[in-house]
Image (tube, rainbow, N blue to C red):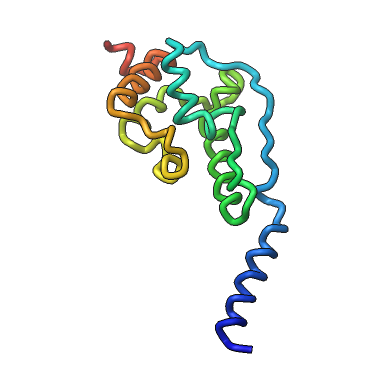
Amino acid sequence: MKKSTKVVLIIVGLAVAIQFVPYGRDHYNPPVIKEPRWDSPRTKALFDRACADCHSNRTRWPAYANVAPISWLVTHDVEEGREHFNVSLWGVQKKNKGDEAAKEVEEGEMPMAIYTLMHLEARLSDEEKKALIEGLRKTFGSEESKED
């Protein structure tokens, strides 16, 4: 057997084997306990489009989230996003960081580039980004919005 054939068989074997790793296959969406009072339907719609998959309990799990190792990354990002800031646990989650949400979007930290690469609908125009930032400030009552 050729060396290149062996290499291909090993790669295929590893790709199949990693599918049996249990992490990344549990696509659980816990119940929504309580959401913030959104300042407008538009803010909620923009948030749902660009942020909710990682920052709520209403994650839309795409088909590629079932294939390791991509499923590991997706699951990790959702778990981390929910832990950091989850609008589905508003008032319940100890460390809600709503006041930081607008800043993260404004600085281009959110939505993450890897997310917008795979979710074209999460790419916001400059006008939509500005509207989302303003809406997040109003919704979450950041210090910046109190000064306006």
**Figure quadrant of residue 53:** top right
For the C terminus, which image quadrant? top left
Residue 19's place in the image compared with 97, above or below, is below
**Figure quadrant of residue 74:** top right
Task: Looking at the picture, tell me which residue is in the foreground, 73 or 138.
Answer: 73
For the N terminus, which image quadrant? bottom right
Task: Looking at the picture, tell me which residue is in the foreground, 3 or 93.
Answer: 3
**Residue, far bottom:** 1
Q: Position of residue 60 (x, y in %)?
A: 59, 33
Question: In the image, 36: left or right of 136?
Answer: right
Task: Looking at the picture, tell me which residue is in the foreground, 41 or 35.
Answer: 41
Residue 36's place in the image compared with 78, above or below, is above
Q: Position of residue 105 (x, y in %)?
A: 36, 31
Kindly identify the residue that appears in the image at 28 percent across and 12 percent down: 147
Q: Position of residue 108 (x, y in %)?
A: 33, 36
Residue 114's place in the image compared with 103, above or below, is below
Kindly identify the residue that appears in the image at 37 percent across and 18 percent down: 137
Kindly identify the residue that appears in the image at 60 percent across and 28 percent down: 58
Residue 72's place in the image compared with 106, above or below, is below
Question: In the image, 77: left or right of 132?
Answer: right
How many marks are shown on the rendered structure? 0
**Figure quadrant of residue 63:** top right
Q: Position of residue 62 (x, y in %)?
A: 58, 40
